[in-house]
Amino acid sequence: MTTTAPGTAPARSLPLFPLGSVADPAPERGVSCPGELPPASDPSLVERARAARAALGDRAFILGHHYQRDEVIQFADVTGDSFKLAREAAARPTAEYVVFCGVHFMAESADILTASHQRVVLPDLAAGCSMADMADIEQVEECWETLEDLGIAGDVIPVTYMNSSADIKAFTGRHGGTVCTSSNAGRAVRWALEQGSKVLFLPDQHLGRNTAVRDLGMDLSDCVVWDPHAPGGGLSGQALRSATMILWRGHCSVHGRFTADSVAEVRARIPGVTVLVHPECRHEVVLAADEIGSTEKIIKRITAAPSGSAWAIGTELNLVRRLAAQNPDKSVAFLDRTVCYCSTMNRIDLPHLVWALESLVAGTVVNQITVDPATAQQARAALDQMLALP
Ligand code: 13P
Ligand code: SF4
């Protein structure tokens, strides 16, 4: 699904934070190092990035996800959660290059949503997402066959989280479903249940469960979990027939580390604290928290909070640190001090950004992300359905 311009590979494939960071992708996406990556110690990196950015002008548009490092986010033309970034990518038909500072599935979605003359660049190809890697298309097709054999596939509408490969989005489009993000999952599942009587929710079981219970008022017993590594998903035909939500057994390796104990501990440590968590957290964490929201919502909530208020945030550390620095009149703490960065988001650093931008200035498109046209067409149907949600 992904191609790289000849001879232009990511220069570093080892995690930048081998200690205390989580969520390296399972498959190796990178190849060998061409030796062109500037050293992180180069004192002129910021200058070089500025000069390359200025030289590219309107030909390039840089998108930055909220989990990116400060050294990278300072060069983003737009920052956002995955929903906002997908919309922004679709809204820039004149930019020749869309440089995506985020992870692989986001860049794939940008390629699907942009015109064919636009090139999407991911500065380090090893920036994947462990959750997206937890559902591959063969496993999902196998699950669908089981539903067909049971005679219930016609009742099921697939809803896939943005954090999934283009293949999975194409599967969703083929079967009349929709993509969702953490900011519109409630609307997406509600829409799906108007089209059918069951939802196959891929690949984040926690977002699916939290959405079913919190947004749609379902009972936990309305949800079953399909285990792609167990025969028949580890579920009986009866369980699949009676479930409303069939949740894929995937999760985020970063958010999955927060626990209900993290919430109890922070409440004891910071009296009066409001606990705000991302919906990729486990259900018991969401139940114990006060509020829940996508990265964009978390930022808006903290920015609008009164001076002197105290917050504990359960999401990725780069974002929480930035929020703390930008809101010195409030107390902004990380929900659990043992949870760290998303290491794959962290792979995009200043040397990789400088390398990608300078290569574009020199006329070489490095680390281009392309989705084949047939897959892109079906995936686009599911993405368009998301963008059209009421
Ligand atoms: P948002 O859509 O809330 O930015 O989340 C994306 C993501 O990968 C969270 O782990
Ligand atoms: Fe994937 Fe989790 Fe990292 Fe988000 S934080 S990109 S879901 S591994």
Image: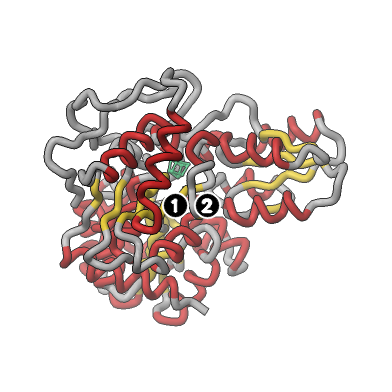
Q: Residue at x 19, y 27 (%)?
A: 34
Label 1 element class = strand
> Going 63% across and 44% down the picture, which residue do you hit?
285
Q: Nearer the viewer, residue 161 or 112?
A: 112
Q: Residue at x 38, y 70 (%)?
A: 178
Q: Amino acid at mark 1?
A: Leu
Could you tell whether 367 is left or right of 95 in the image?
left
Crowding at dot 1, Cα within 10 Å, few <14 / some 14-19 / many 20+, comes out as: many
| SS state under label 2 | strand
Q: Is mark 1 within 8 Å of ligand 1?
A: no
Disc 2 target residue: 79
The picture places residue 354, in percent across and down from the top left corner, at: 37, 35
Q: Amino acid at mark 2?
A: Thr
**Percent position (x, y) of residue 372?**
16, 60
Q: Are marks 2 and 1 in contact (CB under 8 Å)?
A: yes
Q: Nearer the viewer, residue 276 or 11?
A: 11
Q: Point out residue 182 in the picture as x, y percentages from the top left corner.
A: 52, 58
